[in-house]
Image (spheres, grey):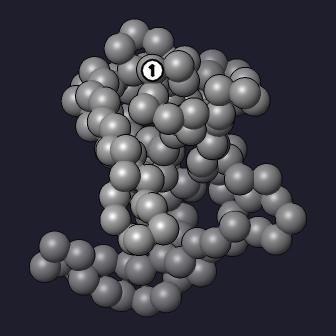
Amino acid sequence: MIEQASLATKRQFENFERFVATEHIEHEEIGPNGESEHPRTRDFNYMVFVEQDKKDKQLYLDEKRDGGTGVDSFPTSLATVGLIGLGVDIFQTGFAKALDFRCEGLGQWRGKAAWVIHFSQKPGARSYLRLWQTKSAQ
């Protein structure tokens, strides 16, 4: 089942050429009294490009916010980069090598039958799904 899910995901991903959206980020600090302090927000024009490496056939995503990838325009010193990989294709070799997969049986998704596949990070393996970057550690 995991191989079939991988093939279905690959077919869907190949149809996903470009993605454009407006990304809205809200940052709130919580004070000692439990209430929000110093709320900051920022909207970005967000675009994703899908590229396939000619040598290893691995699909790569390139994300841009307002034409760049820098963290200086985020509301705080913390920026998120690479979150798009969470919903795209975890079965690709580049991601899958750091994950353990287990089929948990048949389930439902949007009212239709779907295989439920559990995946988790392998102990000691580097994560390729999410990267947190700060202004001071670029």
* x, y percent for residue 43: 27, 28
Name the residue that disc number 1 marks: 73
State which quarter of the image contains the C terminus.
top right
**Left or right: where 28 falls relative to 112:** right
Three-letter amino acid code of the residue under disc 1 = Ser
* x, y percent for residue 99: 69, 64
- Residue 112 at least partly seen: yes
Q: Nearer the viewer, residue 124 or 78?
A: 78
Q: Nearer the viewer, residue 74 or 104?
A: 74
**Left or right: where 86 falls relative to 115:** right
Residue 41, placed above or below residue 5: above
Residue at (54%, 24%) from the top-left corner? 71
* x, y percent for residue 133: 64, 35
Residue at (41%, 71%) from the top-left corner? 33
Q: Residues within 10 Å of mark 1 (few under 14, many from 20)?
A: some
Residue at (45%, 20%) from the top-left corner? 73
